[in-house]
Image: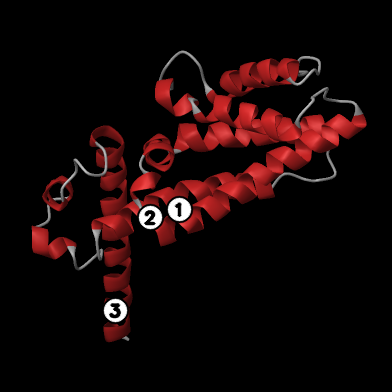
Amino acid sequence: MSNNRSLEEGKLEKGNRRDEILDAAGQLFSRQGFHATSMRDLARAVNLQGGSLYAHIESKEEVLFKLVNRAADGFLSSAEAIPTSLPPKEQLRHLVRGHLEVIVRELDNATVFFHEWKFLSPALQSQIKAQRDAYEGYFRRIIEAGSRSGDFQVEDIRIASLFVLSALNWTYQWYRPGGKMNLETLAQQYCNLIFKALGATASED
């Protein structure tokens, strides 16, 4: 029993250490960039010797992929949770809020996702692109449904979807935690602007 407990505790400790490394990498990559951050920088940030770092991770690219994938999973999970029974306008409201929530909650990872993913190998980039395309598909389907129902007035569904996503994605560039605008206010103002751009009325309270 004691051996089993020690094994489980060891796995938990290693998992916690790995999460600590990923959190530190998110901060470093988002501030310094992927290429400007060395493995020595990462080891120093988590108080490990350089060689000890490789007991928890295989490479710097592996860390980058996990950070980018974590953000991608967050966006997709948020979209997947939206009930399809809601009217298109309500679905888009949830989609906008969910997108902003991921950025606000995981600002470092979101920054890495938007800015550093291009440094992944082509094979890993393809995986992220597939997730990105699947996520973009939620915006297209909802905006198309709203266009059919008369909630939105748009000429080109794809352009409208890219416009909305571009506006939302840029938030990581200027948003700072602890500022004057909380998530609810931010989401409300974005919805008001997006709905107007799509030819709908401003969102209700």
Q: What element carries label 1?
A: helix
Mark 3 residue crowding within 10 angstroms, few (<14) / some (14–19) / many (20+): few
Mark 3, residue position:
7
Q: Are marks 1 and 2 in contact (CB under 8 Å)?
A: yes
Residue drawn at (33%, 51%) of the image: 64
Residue drawn at (64%, 42%) of the image: 136
Instruction: Give the side of residue 195 with respect to residue 35, left or right.
Output: right
- Asked if residue 14 shows in the view, the reply is yes
Question: If the image is split into quadrants, where does the N terminus sit?
Answer: bottom left
Q: Could you tell which of marks 3 and 2 lies nearer the N-terminus?
A: 3
Q: Which of the 4 quarters of the picture holds residue 192? A: top right
Does 75 appear above or below 157?
A: below
Residue drawn at (36%, 57%) of the image: 121
Amino acid, disc 3? Leu
Amino acid, disc 1? Asn
**x, y percentage for residue 60?**
25, 56
Of residues 13 and 194, the one nearer the viewer is 194
Q: Which one is in front in this view, the residue at disc 3 or the one at disc 2?
A: 2
Residue drawn at (43%, 22%) of the image: 175
Of residues 34 and 85, the one nearer the viewer is 34
Mark 2, residue position:
65
Mark 1, residue position:
69
Question: CA gap, disc 1 to disc 3?
Answer: 28 Å
Mark 1 residue crowding within 10 angstroms, few (<14) / some (14–19) / many (20+): many
Q: Is mark 2 on a helix, strand or loop?
A: helix
**x, y percentage for residue 59?**
24, 61
Question: CA gap, disc 3 to disc 2?
Answer: 28 Å
Amino acid, disc 2? Phe
Q: Which one is in front in this view, the residue at disc 1 or the one at disc 3?
A: 1
- Asked if residue 176 shows in the view, the reply is no
